[in-house]
Image (cartoon, rainbow, N blue to C red):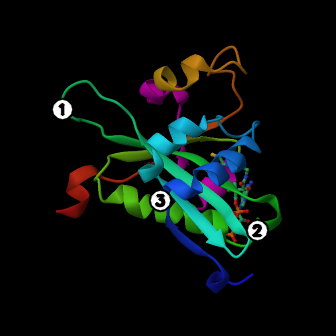
Amino acid sequence: MSQTDYSIRPAGFDDAEAIFALIKQHPEELIPRPISEIVQNIDRFLVCAGPEGILGVVAWHILPEIGASRNPTVEIQSLAVRPSYRGKGMGRRLATAALDHVRLLHPSQVIVLTFHPGFFARLGFREVPKASLMHKIYMGCINCAKYDSPFTCPEVAMALEMGGATATK
Ligand SMILES: CC(C)(COP(=O)(O)OP(=O)(O)OC[C@H]1O[C@@H](n2cnc3c(N)ncnc32)[C@H](O)[C@@H]1OP(=O)(O)O)[C@@H](O)C(=O)NCCC(=O)NCCS
């Protein structure tokens, strides 16, 4: 399949069911998301669309801070490519497109928790201690029912430095 056979585009409400199904197919790697939550955050999703429908998805999420933003951090979430379309560069194109969107916000860093550190290392992410991402751990991991502690969970924490507002000056 060539790159002209599919396109990466912002998701629309019509894509919510397909996004839900694709995320649901990956219970080991992805946090499940209710369709209502996908609809509510549809403006934070990109999809890879081809003649066979939605082939891949990626989303991002802004981590909270108290008061003015001192270390704005965005998390890449829900990245998935349909199994039969993997190994063709679609995952990289989706992740790169998400980073291009997120870069406009001037974050300090983009983070990800992943079972595929090699994939993200190719995009410039570097492994970081989970303890350096406590806001992520409080937001997401605290409700995890799979592992008794985020520090024993096999997912690898990774970060891509983006330089914040200074990167554009
Ligand atoms: C991870 C995933 C999105 C990769 O998608 P993909 O379309 O197969 O990836 P690409 O073809 O764009 O690969 C880009 C590069 O990463 C490499 N790569 C892909 N998966 C990799 C992995 N698991 N480990 C190491 N490298 C990987 C490819 O070899 C390629 O390398 P190259 O630049 O030398 O050519 C896909 O395997 C997937 O959907 N997995 C299930 C859900 C998941 O785990 N998502 C990540 C959640 S954080």
Image: magenta residue range: 117-136
Place of residue 165 in the rendered image (x, y in percent of width and height, measured from the top left)? 21, 53
SS category of the residue bearing label 2 = loop
Residue 64 visible in the snapshot: yes
> Is 134 in front, or is 89?
89
Query: What residue is rendered at 62% in x and 69% in y?
Result: 49
Horizontal and vertical percent position of residue 77: 55, 44
Q: Label 1 sits on what residue type?
A: Ala
Q: Is mark 2 within 8 Å of ligand 1?
A: yes
Residue drawn at the location 57% of the way across and 75% of the way down: 7
Q: Is mark 3 within 8 Å of ligand 1?
A: no
Q: Which residue is mark 2?
A: 87
Element type where label 3 sits in the image:
helix
Point 53% across, 31% down: residue: 129
Horizontally, is 69 left or right of 48 in the view? left
Answer above or below: position of 52 versus 136: below
Q: Quadrant of the C terminus?
A: bottom left
Q: Residue 68 — which label?
A: 1
Residue 1 in the figure: left or right of residue 138? right
**Callout 3 environment at 10 Å: few (<14), some (14 to 19), or many (20+)?**
many
State yes or no: residue 35 in magenta: no
Cα distance in 3D space between marks 1 and 2? 41 Å
Q: Mark 3 sits on what residue? A: 98
Q: CA distance from mark 3 to mark 1?
A: 24 Å
CB atoms of marks 3 and 1 within 8 Å: no
Of the residues under marks 1 and 2, which one precedes in the sequence?
1
Task: Please tell me whether residue 135 belongs to the stretch shown in magenta.
Answer: yes
| Label 2 neighbour load within 10 Å: few <14, some 14-19, many 20+ | few
